[in-house]
Amino acid sequence: MPKMNLSHFEAAFLFSLFTSVVLGVVTKTNDRDRLHYGAYTFGCFLVALFGIGWVMYLGHG
């Protein structure tokens, strides 16, 4: 089985994608709401990823 060498960003991106899909499927009842909520949570994950990354970058000095 081949190994996957993912950067931290790639791993966080995949986590965000899979988690958003699961949250959309589990929490909503119709397909339109699932898609909308999944896209919304994915966007929130990415904003948090970049926001926390910049805070850590600026705080590191």
Image: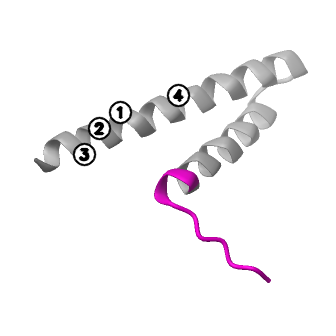
Characterize the local packing of mark 3: few (<14), some (14-19) or many (20 or more) Cα atoms within 10 angstroms.
few
* Label 2 close to label 3 by CB (< 8 Å): yes
Q: Amino acid at mark 4?
A: Cys
Q: Earlier in the sequence, mark 4 or mark 1?
A: 4
Secondary structure category for the residue under label 1: helix
Above or below residue 37? Residue 16 is: below
Q: Which residue is mark 4?
A: 44
Characterize the local packing of mark 4: few (<14), some (14-19) or many (20 or more) Cα atoms within 10 angstroms.
few
Left or right relative to 50: residue 24: right
Query: How far across and how far down the image is residue 1, in percent?
Result: 80, 83
**Which residue is most to the right?**
31
Q: Earlier in the sequence, mark 3 or mark 4?
A: 4
Above or below residue 10? Residue 44 is: above
Residue at 18 percent across and 40 percent down: it is 58
Query: How far across and how far down the image is residue 26, in percent?
Result: 78, 37
Q: Earlier in the sequence, mark 3 or mark 1?
A: 1
Q: Which residue is mark 2?
A: 54
Dominant secondary structure of the residues highlighted in magenta in the image? loop
**Which residue is most to the left?**
61
* Label 2 close to label 4 by CB (< 8 Å): no
Secondary structure category for the residue under label 2: helix
Q: Residue 56 bears which disc, if any? A: 3
Secondary structure category for the residue under label 3: helix
Q: Which residue is mark 1?
A: 51
Q: What residue range appears in magenta?
A: 1-10
Q: How many marks?
A: 4
